[in-house]
Structures are given as structure tokens and as C-alpha cells.
Image: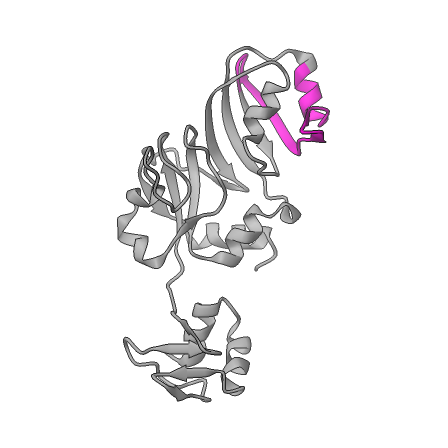
Amino acid sequence: MRLDKYISKALGVTRKEAKEIIRRGEVQVDGEVIRKADFKVPEKANVFVDGQKVEAKDKIYLMLNKPKGYLSTTERDKDYPSFLELIPEYEHLEPFAAGRLDVDAEGFLLVTNDGQLAHRITHPKWKVPKTYEVLLEKPLTEEQIEKIKQRKVLVDGKPVAVEDLKVLEPNRVLLTITEGRFHIVKNLFKELGNKVLNLKRVAIGEIQLDEDLLEGYYRHLTEEEVKKLKKMVGLD
């Protein structure tokens, strides 16, 4: 692999930025300063940038249908396993979940090692919509539906950024929001005196959870799906 491509992958920068880093003499390969962008990096070489070891990792973008009972963090827990146990073949690439999904929730977990994309998908600035199928203990009233749609339900003193609400059945709805506060969906309905019995994320932006994807299984996002996600957060 060319050195500029290696540095680009390792640091998540453009090839142009990688070439500038190389030109400045900040890159060492097996102890030698390399200033040529087209230098071929040997397999298993030790590459350092400004004294810090770096690795060019292949980028992965997975749609995982997370079952209940799995954590969306990479840390192991004495009570619950991490989602990493569902994708052991990719653990060496150090993937993480782009956005929280509670242990008792299920559905679309975007798994990647693209830190820049994950950061923007989860950051409030980019207002990335996430859609959830919510099963409630009690049906919503018309008044409550309008209150939700008009963002008049406050959680911790702040309105919830609701983009859309569709009633599928009296006590089952599709809720689209653009924020990720802790337990925000559960707390939204709690404020209305209701209780969430089941929570399933079914979409992130325009990317829908594949209906054929069984719980606990994953598939790679298509190039088109990755492009859509990147475009949504200004990375196209």
C-alpha cells in the first residue's frame, strides 16, 4: 500500500492531507523517516506519525439487527454481552456502535470503525433522524399525538426533537427523532403517563432496517447506503 493511502486510512484524513504530513517528515516506517508519498509500506511494518504508532484499518459499515439483551457498547458486562460477540470476525478492526441502543431495545445498530462518520451521526448538530417502532402500554389520545408532533412534550425541561409520528395501531407508533438523549423515547412517553413495552429502531436517516435480516445477524451496507449516510452529514 502507498504510504499516503496508509496514512489517510490510519488517521481518517484526505490523501492530500496525508501527503502534507509525509512531506513535513512526521512519518516513520520501521524507524526511518519517509518523505515520499508513493513509498510502498511493507507488510507488518511499524508506522509512526509524530511519534505515535498508527495502523491503516479497513473501514467497515455494518447493519446489525441487535436483539434484546445485548449492550451497544464495546465493554463487557457481567450481566450482558456486548454486540461484538455477534460479529467476532470483525473485532480485530475495533468497530463500535454509531449511537446508543438500550440493552432492552432491539433493531438497527450501525456498526463501523469510521470515527468521523459515527461522530457526525450521533452529534446533535447534524440532526440525523432515527426512526423507532414503539409498542405502548396504552393507546395515545389525539391530544397527546398533537402534543408530541408539535414538540410540546418536555423531558428534563427541554422539548424532544420529534420529526414525525405515525400511528400504526392504537398503541403502536413509528416515532422519528433527531436526538439521542439517554432513554429519550421512554422518557417522552413517560411524561404522558404511558410506558414503552417494546422499542425497535427501524431506520437511520433513509437507511431502513432490512426486513429479511434476522435478529442477531448483520449485513454490510451497500456503497449507495454509505454514500447516503455520508451525504446526510456533509462527508460526501
Identify the residue at horizontal 52%, vertical 55% (top origin).
117
Residue 143 drawn at (x, y percent) = 70, 13
In the picture as drawn, the residue positioned furthest to the front comes out as: 78
Residue 56 drawn at (x, y percent) = 39, 69
Report which quarter residue 40 is drawn in.
bottom left
> Horizontally, is 142 left or right of 19 in the view?
right
> Horizontally, is 126 left or right of 53 in the view?
right
Residue 225 drawn at (x, y percent) = 47, 50
Asked if 88 appears above or below 9 in the picture, the reply is above
Asked if 40 appears above or below 61 in the picture, the reply is below
Which quarter of the rendered picture does the C terminus lie within?
Answer: bottom right
Residue 158 shown in magenta: yes
Report which quarter residue 147 is drawn in.
top right
Identify the residue at horizontal 66%, vertical 48% (top origin).
125
Identify the residue at horizontal 61%, vertical 25% (top origin).
165
Identify the residue at horizontal 55%, vertical 48% (top origin).
121
State which region is magenta.
144-172
Which quarter of the rendered picture does the N terminus lie within?
Answer: bottom left
Residue 21 drawn at (x, y percent) = 52, 80
Asked if 53 appears above or below 124 in the picture, the reply is below
Which one is nearer the viewer's eye here, 48 or 122? 48
**Way the structure is coloured:** one colour
